[in-house]
């Protein structure tokens, strides 16, 4: 989780700030903060980009109308009810994974990259 958060902070610093969980108010004026906070799938709100993981183009794809993401060394199918169906203002794909008590990773939300 720390690596993910560090990567997101670095990306936000280089390109633009997109972190929506803003405990210290550092990103309060970020124009994408309300957008990230509003993202939801049929499973409910996605939370914020701070809870999400940016996915490089080589680590997600679509086959036969279904998405999958490469996380922790394996491909995980994205359930249809986890799709965020709004235009991606951030640009890069973002996934909100959840790890169950048994260690199984499931997808709460996924938004494809702007080109996908």
Image (tube, rainbow, N blue to C red):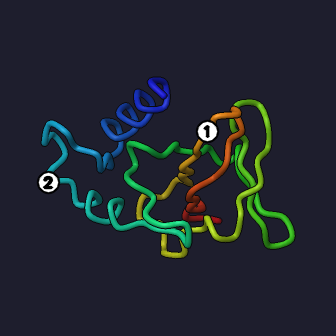
- Picture quarter with the C terminus: bottom right
Query: Left or right of 48: which side holds 70?
Result: right
* Residue 14, numbered circle: none
Query: Left or right of 21: which side holds 48?
Result: right
Residue pushed farthest top? 2
Query: Which is more N-terminal, label 1 or label 2?
Result: 2
Residue at screen point 53% across, 50% down:
96
Eye-nearest disc, 2 or 1:
1
Residue 92 percent coordinates (x, y) = 52, 53
Task: Assign a secondary structure to mark 1.
Answer: strand
Residue at screen point 42% across, 58% down:
90
Which residue position holds label 1?
99
**Circles 2, 1 touching at the beta carbon (< 8 Å):** no
Residue pushed farthest right? 64
Query: Left or right of 68: which side holds 7?
Result: left
Is 107 drawn above or below residue 35 in the view shown?
A: above
Q: How many marks?
A: 2
Front-most of residues 42 and 67: 42
Which residue position holds label 2?
29
Front-most of residues 15 and 22: 22
Task: Assign a secondary structure to mark 2.
Answer: loop
Residue at screen point 79% across, 44% down:
75
Residue 29 percent coordinates (x, y) = 14, 54
Residue 56 percent coordinates (x, y) = 62, 43
Residue at screen point 41% across, 27% down:
6
Query: Left or right of 112: which side holds 11?
Result: left
Residue 10 percent coordinates (x, y) = 37, 31
Q: Residues within 10 Å of mark 1 (few under 14, many from 20)?
A: few
């Amino acid at each position: 989780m720390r690596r993910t958060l560090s990567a997101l902070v670095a990306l936000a610093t280089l390109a633009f700030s997109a972190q929506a969980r803003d405990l210290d108010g550092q990103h309060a004026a970020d124009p994408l903060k309300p957008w990230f906070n509003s993202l939801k799938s049929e499973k409910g709100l996605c939370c914020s980009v701070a809870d999400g993981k940016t996915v490089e183009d080589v680590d997600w794809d679509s086959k036969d109308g279904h998405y999958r993401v490469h996380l922790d060394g394996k491909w995980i199918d994205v359930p249809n009810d986890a799709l965020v169906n709004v235009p991606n203002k951030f640009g890069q794909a973002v996934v909100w994974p959840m790890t169950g008590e048994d260690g199984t990773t499931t997808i709460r939300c996924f938004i494809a990259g702007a080109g996908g």
